[in-house]
Amino acid sequence: MEEYPFIDDNSHHAVLLLHGLCGTPAELGSIPKALEWVGYAVFSLEIPNYSAKLITPGVTPDWEEWCDAVNAEVLRLKEQYETVSVCGLSMGATLALATAIRRKDVLAIVALSPILRYDGWAIRWYEPLMAVPYWFGFRNWSYKEHQPFGLRNTEMRRRVAKALEKDGVAEIGAAAIPLRQLVAAKDMMTFVRRNLRRVRCRIEVIHAVDDETAAPRNAERILKEVGSEVRQVIWLGDCYHIITFDNEREIVTNETVRFINKSVHAYRDDMRHRRHAKRPALRDRR
């Protein structure tokens, strides 16, 4: 991992981390420690009926409640810190976009493997039809995760498969995702697709060209349609969907820290310029 110097002034900025659907904060890999190393205040959020440890069987989730939870956390952080950025992985990236659509005071978003549609090469043909039995009342079943588990790295894949079999959850998330959560996530994706133009904050998308869950066109659409003046994409050629644990995880961590650094420093430069512009001109009284 690239080493960045600790900057005490960075302590005025908070970064909120959002894991994927039915996942855990561990999914963000080395990103939390890297952000803390350069002085940022880093927070992870676990959300009822979204996070793996907080799923209540039989309860139908509402994606807007997920957004409300993120919104409340951003508000809390804004009371303590000058600025706040959000970094999300997978559906966490989509949730970050939904948050930026609903509020305008997020400084920057880092969207890691964002999903607007489940359309990657490993998505099974019947996935678009899963909502049909749901609306007919057949809701108590789950979508089981399968190979390659979002990982191109074969050693990591074996490790994850073993953890999923033993504990039902691993670094990449849970062994299965309830249909109720998937349907709520699809509703959130629809909201985000329709409102991308309302995203105004600085945004970086990091996406694998071989993402098996969300095809590259997800990232392309985000970059094309958001209203952000500052937008960029980093393409990865040796990863699948869970880029925080795959072959190019160090690049992911370094680019995330670099983009947040640039965003914070650009904001502070802008604030200094504005304060200087407001100073009254000194008159020559001679």
Image (cartoon, grey):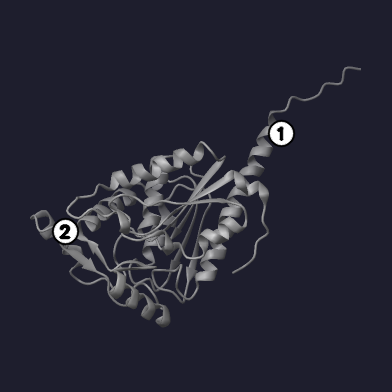
- Camera-nearest residue between 54 and 148: 54
Q: Which mark is residue 70?
A: none
Mark 2 vs mark 1, CA separation in Å: 56 Å
Residue positioned most to the front: 166
Report the side of 76 relative to 136 (left or right). right
Residue 7 location (% of width, % of height)? 67, 52
Residue at position x 51%, y 66% in the image: 252
Q: Amino acid at mark 2?
A: Ala
Q: Where residue 74 sits: x, y (%)? A: 45, 42
Residue at the extreme top:
285
Would residue 104 be visible to someone looking at this image? no
* Residue under label 2: 131
Q: Quadrant of residue 120?
A: bottom left
Q: Which mark is residue 276?
A: 1
- Left or right of 157? Residue 79 is right
Residue type, label 1:
His
Question: Horizontally, is 148 left or right of 5 in the view?
Answer: left
Q: Quadrant of the N terminus?
A: bottom right
